[in-house]
Amino acid sequence: MTEEKYYESQSFENLKYREETFRKYRFVDCSFTNCTFEECVLVQSSFSGCTFCKCTITSLRASDHSQIQNVEFADCNLIGVHWDELLPAGKFAEPIKKLQTCRLKYNTFAEMDFRKFDFSGQDITDSMFAKCRLMECNFKGCNLERTEFFQCNIQKADFRQASGYQVDVLTNKMSGARFSFPEVMSLLSGLHINID
């Protein structure tokens, strides 16, 4: 039986892990700077209240009660992360507390609660929000190229100056959402109509 490795309020810099399995690790209020985690797996591990700055996280996977809770990311590359796998047990808290100047590609967010979350200015491409609660979220100025929103509640969300989003008007709740022209025209693409 593996003993839990516990780290609290510690700083980690320039770590590089590829295809590593973190088994029974617990990080609380730790900071990670210039670290790389490529295709790593969390097993019975958690990150709570941690900050990641200038880090690259690629294809992170989790199993066996692993979770990320209230984590902040600044100037990070987050690629191929399935965030729903990282939800705390019972889904009582969300994995991401704050995003600042991050690039997200091939990310999946499913059945998550981001009410009033500030995504503004982020680069979120080739990603998917499915069945998420995104009421009153701020997507202002985001590059959302090829990012889909499916069966989400985006009521009162702000998409002004955002570009590239794919929002299906038939499956999303959109009352009060704000969009800017000409990007708002993309909302018509799923209706298969002709505009002259």
Image (cartoon, rainbow, N blue to C red):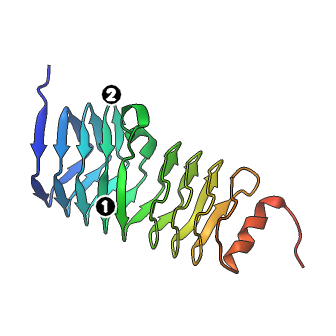
* Disc 2 packing (10 Å; few <14; some 14–19; many ≥20): few
Left or right placement of residue 79 versus residue 37 in this view:
right
Foreground residue among 159 and 195? 159
**Residue under circle 2?**
64
Q: Residue at x 36, y 47 (%)?
A: 95
Q: From the viewer's perspective, is residue 112 above or below residue 101?
A: above
- Quarter of the figure with the C terminus: bottom right
Q: Position of residue 128 (x, y in %)?
A: 55, 53
Quadrant housing the N terminus = top left
Residue at point 50%, 49% (across, down): 108
Is residue 120 rendered to the left or right of residue 166? Answer: left
What amino acid is labelled 1 in the image? Answer: Phe
Q: Earlier in the sequence, mark 1 or mark 2?
A: 2
Is residue 82 in sight in this rendering? Answer: no
> Residue 162 in the image: x percent, y percent?
57, 74
Q: Which residue is mark 1?
A: 73
Whether residue 140 is visible: yes
Q: Quadrant of residue 3?
A: top left
Mark 1 crowd level (few <14, some 14–19, many ≥20, 10 Å Cα): many
Q: Nearer the viewer, residue 56 or 12?
A: 12
